Every structure is written in C-alpha cells, then in structure tokens.
Image (cartoon, rainbow, N blue to C red):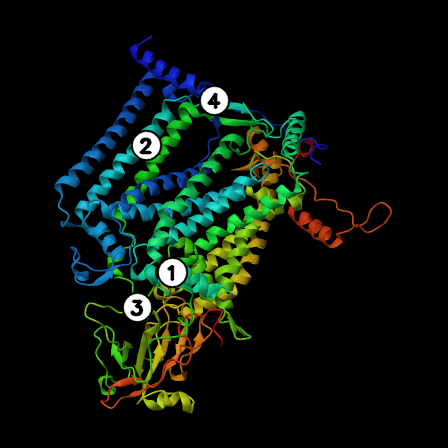
Amino acid sequence: MSNEIEAIKDPGLPAHVHRRADTDPKAAKKAERQVAILFLLSALGTITLIGSYIFIPQNVFIFFPVLGNTNAHQLFLGLGMAASLFFIGMGAIHWAKTLMPDEEVVIQRHEFRSPDEDRADFIRTAKEGAAAAGLGRRSLIKRSLGLSLGLVGLSPLILLRDLGPLPGNSLTKTSWKAGTRLVTDPGDRPIRPEDMEVGAVAQTLPAVVLAPGEHRKLSDIAKDAVLLIRLRPEEFNLDAERLSWTHEGIIAFSKICSHMGCAVALYEQQTKHLLCPCHQSTFDVTRAAKVIFGPAARPLPQLAITVDSEGYLVAQSPFNEPVGPSFWERSS
Amino acid sequence: MTARERIAGSVANYVDERTGAAKWMKKNLTKVFPDHWSFLLGEIALYSFVILLLSGTFLTFWFDPSQREVIYDGSYEPLQGLEMSAAYASTLDISFEIRGGLLMRQIHHWAALIFMAAIVVHLMRVYFTGAFRKPREFNWIIGVGLLTLGIVEGFLGYSLPDDLLSGTGIRIAEAIIQALPLVGSYLAFFAFGGAFPGEAFIPRIYTVHVLLLPGAFLALITVHLMLVWYQKHTQYPGPGRTEKNVVGYPLLPVYMAKAGGFFFIVFGVTAFLGAVASINPIWLYGPYTPAQVSAGSQPDWYMGWLDGLVRMAPPLESYIFGYTISWNILIPGLIVPGILFTGMALYPFIESWITGDKREHHLLDRPRNAPNRTALGVMSLTFMLVALINGGNDIIATTFDLTINQIMWFSRIGIFVLPPLAFVITKRLCLSLQRADRELVLHGRETGRLVMMPHGEFVEVHEPISPEKAWLLTQHEQNPPLALEESDLRGVRRPGVLKNKLRARLSKAHAVSIPKATAEDLKEIEHH
C-alpha cells in the first residue's frame, strides 16, 4: 500500500555535531581530569573498605537518620565497596562520552538465509551421509537402536527411585490416639480444662515419650499440631456429635491449614474466627471451623477431646480424617 | 616500535599462530552496537547474574546446607540456646560472625531482585518494540526460559536459610506438588525424602541452586548473547536507520568502555543497597517449625503474583470416585501460570500467523504503531498487577486500613474486568497517539504564539517539524489485513473455514491504524 503513495523521504543520518572536547584542547584536558578524579574516588572507596574491615569492630552501632541504628562495620565496608565499584564505572563512561570518538558508524546487515546452492549442498551431504550409514535400508539397526536409546532413558528414572519412601498411609495418620494427652508447645506440660480461661488459645502437641536427647521430628509436628480454643459452651453452633467432641467449651482443631498446610495461627477473639496468614482462609470456630472466606475448600479437622482420670485433656480418638493440604488419594 | 609493542606483538603472534584469532577479532572489534537506554536493561540482567555468581560463591564458603539439628551458640543473643537446623545457624553465622558476610548476603539478595526486575523490564522492552519478530524468535523463547528458571532459582535461593518465613514458602510449594493428580503425593515424598519437611530437602535444593540451575543459566545466557552478537542488535527507527544497516558505536573502544563501565555501576549500586538497605533479616523470623508462622508472610516480589492468584482462588475441590482434585491449588498454581507462560513463549509465532508477515525485522516498532500488540501487553501486565496486589492483600489491608475481604473481592472481580478494560483503553490511546503524530507531521508543532489576523481572528502559529522528526513519525509500515477468501475461484468453500475466519478477524483487528501522513498529504496542504 505504502508503495503506491509517495511517502515522506528519509533525510539520512544527521550531520555529526562536535563536542567541546573535540575542538577545544582545554575542554579535553578538563574532561581528562574529571575522569581521573572519578577513578581516584574509586581508589578511596577501596581504602575505606580495607580500613573498615580491619579497624571497625563488628559490634559498633551508630545512629543515622533514615537508616536508624546501623552496624558501622557492615555499613562502611559496604559503602567503601560500593564507591570502589561505582566510580570505576562512572569514570569509564565519562571517558567514553567525552573523549572517545562519538561519531556513529554504519555497518550493513546480511541476510541469514544461506544461498540456494549451499542449502542444496547441505541437503545432498546430509542425504549422502544418511545413505552411507544405511539408516534407511537397515531397519533392524534403526529399530534396535531406537529401543536401546529409549531404555537408556529409563535408567536415570529408575536410579532416582530411592529419593524417598512411598507415602503409604503417612499422609492420613497422625500421632494422636485415643487417650493421648494434649501438652503445651513449647513446654510439654499437660493441660487441665481449668488452666484455660474463656477466650484463651493454646498451641498443643500429643504427649509422646522421648528418649533422652531425642527430639520431636518436624515431620510429626507438621501433622500433629493442634490448636485449643475455649469458648462459652452456648456459643457453639454444632451438631450433637461434634458438640460431644468438645469439653466444657474447649474445642480442638488441627493447626495445619486444610488449604496449603501453613499454621493457622491467627485467632480473632471477637469474631471467633481462625485466619491462616498465608492465603487468608478464614474458619469459623463456632461452626466446627467451617470455611467462611478464602481459598480453603475444607474445614480444619476437629480433634475429639475429653479428660482422663487425672483431669487432663486427652484425645477421645484419632483424627477421623487426614490433616493438612489435600492430595490425590484423599477420599473426601 | 617500543618495547611494550614488541611484547604485545609477540603474545598476539603466539595466540594467532595457534588459533587464527586475529581474523575473527579484527571483524568483531569493529562490530557496531546501537545506543539506547532501553538496550541497557538486558545488560543489567547479565551483570546482576555475574554479581550473583560472585556473591553466591562467597556465601557457599560458610553456608552449611543441612537440616541436622544444632543448638545455636553464636553471638546473636535472642536465639542463643535454641534448636535449629545447621542451615539456619550457618546463615546466622554468615550474618553475625563473618566479616562482610551480612553485606554479601544482602548484595546476593538485592542482586536477585534486580536480576528478576531487569529480566521483566527487558522482556517488556523486547515485546513492546516487536524485537521478538523474525529472526529473533529463538532468543525470545530462550528469554522466556531464563525468566522461568529465574523464578525457580530465586525461590530456591531464599528457601535455603530454613527460617520461619522461607520454610512456610517450602510448605506451600510442597502443597502444590502434593495437589498434582495421580502422582502428587509420590512426587512430594520423593522430593522431600519422606514426609514434609524431612531432612533432605535443603541439601537437595542447594545442589540445584548452586550447580544445576546456574549451569543451565550459563548455557542459555551464552546462546542468548551469541545470537544477539551473530544476528546483530535491533535498532530504533530514525533518519538513516534502515532494515539493512546498523547505526551505532564500535565495540572498541566506545561500547567496551560503556558496557564495562556499566557493569561496575550496576555492581556499585547493588553494593550500596547491600550496605544501607536491610533485606531478609532472617534472625528476626526464627528457625522453621511447621506449627508456627509469621503474620504478613510474603514471598519475594517475582513470586507475589503467583501467591496472589492462589489467594484469590475460589474454594473448589472435587471428590471423584474417592479421589481429590484441588482446583483451588491447581488452577492458580499450575494451570493459569502454564497458560500464561506458554502463550508468552508462543507469541512471536501467533503474531506472525495473524499478520502473515514472514520477513526479517531489525527496525523496532514504536509501541503506538502496533496498537493490538501493545494493548495485549498492557492487558497481560494488568492481569499480573492485580494478582500481585492480591498477593500483598494482608500488607495493603493493614497499611491502608482496609479489610482483606474488600481487597480480595476487588481482585477476584478485577482480574476478569480490568485486563480487558486495559486492552481497550491502550488500543484507543495508541490510535490517538497515531492521530497526534499525523497532525504533527501535517500541521506542525504548536508554538504557543498567537497572531491576530487582519480580519480580527486569532490563530496560533504552527511551525513545521524537522525532516528528521517527520521521517521518524512516518517511517513505519502500515500493512493491510490478510485477505483470506472463504471460497476459491469456483465458489467451493476452502477447508479450515473457521480457522481462516478467526485469522482474518484477528488480522483485521491487528491492522487497525490511523493512516500515516504522506508526502502527498503535505503537498495538498501546501496548496491551501
């Protein structure tokens, strides 16, 4: 289209405009001095770095506006390093801009496409090569090679098998059993109902017997963490079964979010909502942790609790569903 | 000949007799690079990568990538006596005991943020100027690959210290793996060497973070740069610049001095940030335990959009034949990002299919002259921005005294409404700018000088613009849409009618433009 109508003409490269340093030796001398000063500032930066490393102790803090209390060692080390690098760059660029030639140069592009005869040559060579190897004729070789190459590809997959055990029932089981005491985390102290006032929250784990020097595994904590919350019994809005899972207004939920497994750690006492700080799934404690907002699709699993003969809170039974985020084999 | 010249000469002779390098060097030392600030964006990404390699190597000398439990006995008092992983303890040691360690940690983290930001802005420059067109499609795809790897590498990097914040991030990554249909729980157990968190994950991602991915980066960056070198850089349109030439400065000495100097400037600025701007103060978060979390948990910025999508997802799960499909994780965590990144990688081919343009392009487009492309780009950015805003919904809620629900609903509706709106507005703006260009060429520049005509009318004096400017505003091609006939000459319907119809419609939308001013238009005006 644009070929038919006369377009506006390309005036061509504009004429080169000389800089002052190109024509005036004084200006050039001045630019040279500026470049030298920039490089010297860099040297000063390195000296600052070395001095800070050796002479400023690591525990000195000084106050700067905006920055606040700052570790002097780290600050001056960094500032020295920054200056030593930055001013080399500034010097080089100032040099290029004031003293190196600034006349633009034109070079020509070439088409990437190979000439037709080269392409024809290439195809002929490739075909000859393939024919010489007999790839087309010797189908037995071709097929057996294909088979063996495919099988070789399997071996790294096989060799990676021992990266980890199979899940088994690990995702569906926790350490909670009927009669397991709830103990505080941290502290491992058993809890009596009267230890918790109305409105109180407690972070708990199952009581386990550990050999001296043995620790709880983080992978157990990742499934076992339970949150206790005490409300007034009349505040619950639960069916008879779920109500029987509470004890004197104390209700227990898995602390591991049913969405992506973060700890559901924020409890709003006024609204009686539990909020997961990762993706803001919000659960209503009075209605068995029903999801009332956010991306979680399931309530937090509720742990049935009661008290044992000594009056400590214990689990009535294990969780009746897997805790934590969903997975393919989960059945509901 | 001075002594120095003699020595240099004999060294050069020694090398050349064994490699024949002189011929190659002669040709390439005079290679021309066009000059424009926007061409520095990719350089920032490259230099940040070098900074990451240097600072990262420093960190590996003291970092202990192990989840073995240790008791902390370092100089940071609030954590003394606490059980924690060796990874976390050694990160504390780097921060408090090793001189310059905290500086290097902060430089490393800042460089990672700058690396990702530079990649994204460089990608925007390449997209909006059409630099991805033939023959540079390979480099576009490599670039998309580098962006993807960068997101993964950054995530693995900030996960290594095993603090409470990063452990929470790993937990979420584990949940995404676990949500995969069929193989999810198996993959999760393989990746973590058993149940989450286990003791295998940090050592494993350490190998990936310091060996596998940097290797992949080096290979891809090398190919990326070799292609830039071989294909020569694109250039912005202007007087004397054509599809057939390159106008700029020679490698030696100007470009070398500028590019080399720029490396030091990028490094210097990153070091300055590392010196004065605290980043990821892991000692405040404490060691990771799955039962705890900190309020306001935020990933690094380049992951924020993904987190935002996950946050706004509706609470959907399907239970079919005793199996669970977590749409609330799969859609925002895998399906939408998959579509976005695949679409991005394929865009050069999609556009060339729409326009039917199979020619080489070395002159860049001014974004306004490709309204459809520009609008699509702004639309995608708007999508990402809404997702990113929602990723910070808790922070925004506390900062601006809003409720999380308000922001979440704004995002849930906005993610559907705002991107198309951005498309329409951008396309209109582009066409208005084209109209303004046309006006400027035909009627010149408004001078602000008012003149009273003999008959009392006031007019503003317009001054003609320079021939250079007029050329810049009219040099672009305006191609008609593809003419795709539905039936052939004998009236028989061609196969693939629907596909052709779609292509014709897209092509028509793509070709919408305000006719640029021509020499004939100018002549006509002169007659009046």
Q: Which mark is residue B24?
A: 4
Q: Earlier in the sequence, mark 3 or mark 4?
A: 4
**Residue count near mark 3 (Cα–Cα under 10 Å), binned few <14, some 14–19, many ≥20:** many
- Quadrant into which the C terminus of chain B falls: top right
Q: Which residue is mark 1?
A: B192
**Residue B457 in view (yes/no):** yes
Residue B296 in the image: x percent, y percent? 34, 64
**Residue B513 in view (yes/no):** no
**Residue count near mark 2 (Cα–Cα under 10 Å), binned few <14, some 14–19, many ≥20:** many
Q: Which residue is mark 3?
A: B292
- Alpha-carbon distance for marks 1 and 2? 48 Å
Establish whether labels 1 and 2 are both on one chain. Answer: no
Q: Are marks 1 and 2 in contact (CB under 8 Å)?
A: no
Residue B495 as seen in the image, left or right of residue B125: right
Q: What's the amino acid at mark 3?
A: Gln
Q: Earlier in the sequence, mark 3 or mark 1?
A: 1
Between marks 1 and 2 in the image, the one whose residue lies nearer the viewer: 1
Establish whether labels 4 and 1 are both on one chain. Answer: yes
Q: Chain of mark 2?
A: A
Residue B463 as seen in the image, left or right of residue A242: right
Element type at marker 4? helix
Residue B247 in the image: x percent, y percent? 51, 27
Give the residue drawn at x 27%, y 55%: B87
Element type at marker 3? loop
